[in-house]
Image (cartoon, rainbow, N blue to C red):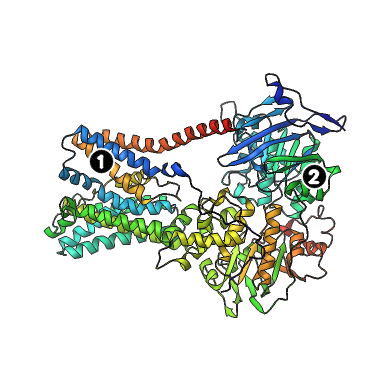
Amino acid sequence: MTDHTLDTLAGSPGTLPDRLDLGWRRWMRWEVLLLAVAIGIFLINSFASPYFLDPWNLSDATFNFTEKAIIALAMALLIIAGDIDLSVASIIALASVTMGAAAEAGVGTPGLVAVGLLTGLAAGAFNGFLITRFQLPSIVVTIGTMSLFRGICYIALGDGVYRNYPSSFAWFGQGYVWWVFSFELALFAVLAFLFGLLLHKTVFGRQIFAVGNNPVAALFSGVRVQKVRFSLFLLTGLASGIASILLTARVGSTRPSIALGWELEVVTMVVLGGVSIMGGSGTIVGVVIAAFVMGLVTFGFGLLNVPGIVMSIFVGLLLIGVIALPIGIRKLARRWQGVSGRAKR
Amino acid sequence: MVTVSAQKPSGEGPGEAQASQPFPVMPGEPAPLLFMRGIAKSFPGVRALDGVDLALYPGQVTALIGENGAGKSTLVKTLTGIYQPDEGQILLEGEAVTFDGAEDAMRRGITAIHQETVLFDELTVAENIFMGQQPRTRWGFVDWKLMRERTREIFARLETDIHPDTRLRDLGIARKHLVAIARALSVDAKIVIMDEPTASLSHKEVEELYAIVDTLKAEGKAILFISHKFEEVFRVADRYTVFRDGKSVGFGLMANADTNHLIRLMVGRTVDQVFPKIETEPGEAVLAVEGLCHPTEFADISFTLRKGEILGFYGLVGAGRSEVMQALFGITATSSGSVTLGGQPYRCTHPREALEAGLVYVPEERGRQGVVLQLPVFENIALPSLGRISHSGFVRMAEQFDLARGYARRLQLKAHSLSQEVGTLSGGNQQKVVIGKWLAMGPRVIILDEPTKGVDVGSKAAIHGFMSELAAQGLSVIMVSSEIPEILGMSDRVMVMREGRIVGAFERGGLDAETLVRAATGNEGAASTSGTASQEQAHAAPHP
């Protein structure tokens, strides 16, 4: 390798600054807005219900989002790369059914965990293979596998139920690591940290953004685009497998309808977290805050005995509101800027 | 010469009408059809237009000339109603107008044929032409019959025979262009804006376009013609307006102008038109290609590239040059043939392998293939080098900045900062980012595909300068170009391709434009009378 210099041509060009200081505008971020929403909901909840601030109640609150949030971490990477996986809830069901069948056959807890993880990986690999090998659109393929995986569960189990899980298996869904901190929450925290590193600090993460913004230019820059995409489907499958273990261990039984409709909640979490549904941008911090926002809303409404339908209406409004708000603010800012800019001249 | 200023509109402040200079008009000539005066438009951090004037006359072509970033595109967007000007006024037939969006501008008879034609690939030609203005039947349904009929009528005027039901994606780029022109004609426009209409057309197609421009002129339409190529401007335009840094710096009749004068106005200084070619003595063979074939795109490609050499590849659009280069870069699969790189057999199925072997490719379609427009400068430059600067998979932002800073400085990149999105840079500076990203890989062979396409004059000279210098330092360069002066000025040797085959190899000494064109078109008379040459198949890719 040779090093080519062009110093003779470059007369006396100034060195470009790394970035221009944007001052307060650096804080005009989605994540900051979301955090404000989260704090707001927390405060409203703590005034609305006397039971809300109890540490054990708060701990309980985390159970209704950690499993989905773990999938959302992987889904965020996948959506940033310009793909989507709508089969995640069906992968949960498939993994749960295979674990249930294995438990019936007398497999112990470590074996069940392995079965759950491998089923998730296999389902992710199947999705990834179809999509990257045959260049099919991910939304179509995963809508297909969503029905396929769920259908297999119904055939295998009918209206039956698997519930012969060993008692030690329950710890994954019901156990506590320390004080009020559940294994689920601890695992989510660790995974969030790891996914944050992966997306924001590694070569692989940079490649995800390049692929999501422009797969052609990424290929022309020597990025192994199909490999990156395949890995992400694998990762999403694995995350679904993990979620399946947690959920199955928590409820202690498997029905073919387990985790029905979760894929949309996961995608909602990711989009609420500021990940562009068109791909190319997003952060793990945003997704984590979004997970807490959705968890707090669901739990707060639960304490107030608000029916589930009202809850889903609120989540829908929240999603639209949080997306519309920054656009409105930007428009106002531009108008204000235009006025002051003209005044200066 | 007398000067005429457009009518003062009623209801406007009296001071504004005299604010800008009137345009000179010959006696007896029509008043301008459109008159833009003192137009200003700002974006956060940029003043894209800073008080420009522009006049368009019926039955005349006005050329808009300026470097990239001079404000031409912003002006087009203002004129087509996509942007609202911050200041200034637009007089259409003497009447002050404001455009309420693109549709409004179109209704008032202003249409634009854009640089990268925005059309609908999956729809038919007729639908593309009448999108948004489909004729209706009595019952309110789309009148397909009338639509096809009118499509045929328009194509008859253009003397082409594209079938109205053809899907757009089945057409070549030149014919897509014709569809865009047909669309402009379908609305019975008074003003037609052509934004670099010849950028991706072959020689013959350009001549056809000139004929269409003449037709439009004869129909009394006012045409705004934006181009980087002076020969083209002198061929079609009656008047010129020159923009520099968001200001109009000169206007007049083409008859009274010459190239040097226009260039002076454009860059504010005279540019040495001589290519900065450094004479070198090419060394041993670095890349040897032997009988490379592709099922449909090219066949039997053989050539060698020596150390420190610039090898030009000339040919018409569709001759298969880019396909050969993309095969060498591992994008396109080949069916047979062998390649040797640096004495080692070279087989490549993915660009990653090409990079590892030291071969890099600067693609023609910069925005789609060359850079990730939404990512900042530093990430684009560092993208292929990430593996090299990483520590067990982790990469620090500071190291990406270090890498990018060096190349940005060497290539004289003009940007606000390294964190600026590449999409906000001018074409020339985007190209510097692509070149910088490859130089960071320390290549042995660099392939440049139309390196100065859509690049302003200043950046063009800079890019030619780097090329020369890199070759002098021992880098082997392949330059694919459709610009004859560039090929003649920069290459040590020239390969000419036609219909997927190499049809000629020429040394630098004694090579002239006519020889090249003759070889590229396969027509003895083509060089002198390319306009009438009926070599329809000459620029068609050899599809099975």
Label 2 element class? helix
- Residue pictured at 23% horizontal, 45% vertical: A64
| Residue A3, visible in the rendered structure | yes
Tell me the residue at 16%/35% (across/down). A50
- Amino acid carrying mark 2 in the image: Val
User: How far from the left and from the top, in percent, is residue B2?
Assistant: 86, 30
Along the line of sight, which residue is nearer the eye, B338 or B386? B386
> Furthest residue to the left?
A167
Q: Residue furthest top?
A: B11
Q: Which residue is mark 1?
A: A296
Q: Chain of mark 2?
A: B
Foreground label between 2 and 1 = 1
Residue at point 54%, 30% (across, down):
A339
For image coordinates 48% across by 34% down, the residue present is: A333
Distance, label 2 to label 1, CA atoms, is 68 Å
B13 to B404, vertically: above or below: above
Residue B348 quadrant: bottom right
* Image position, residue B304 (x, y; %): 67, 75
**Which quadrant is home to the N terminus of chain B?**
top right
Q: Secondary structure at mark 1?
A: helix
Side of A44 relative to B59 (left or right): left
Chain holding disc 1: A
User: Where does residue A244 sit, x and y in percent of width and height?
Assistant: 24, 54
Q: Amino acid at mark 1?
A: Leu
Say whether residue B337 is left or right of residue B194.
left
Tag 2 residue? B236
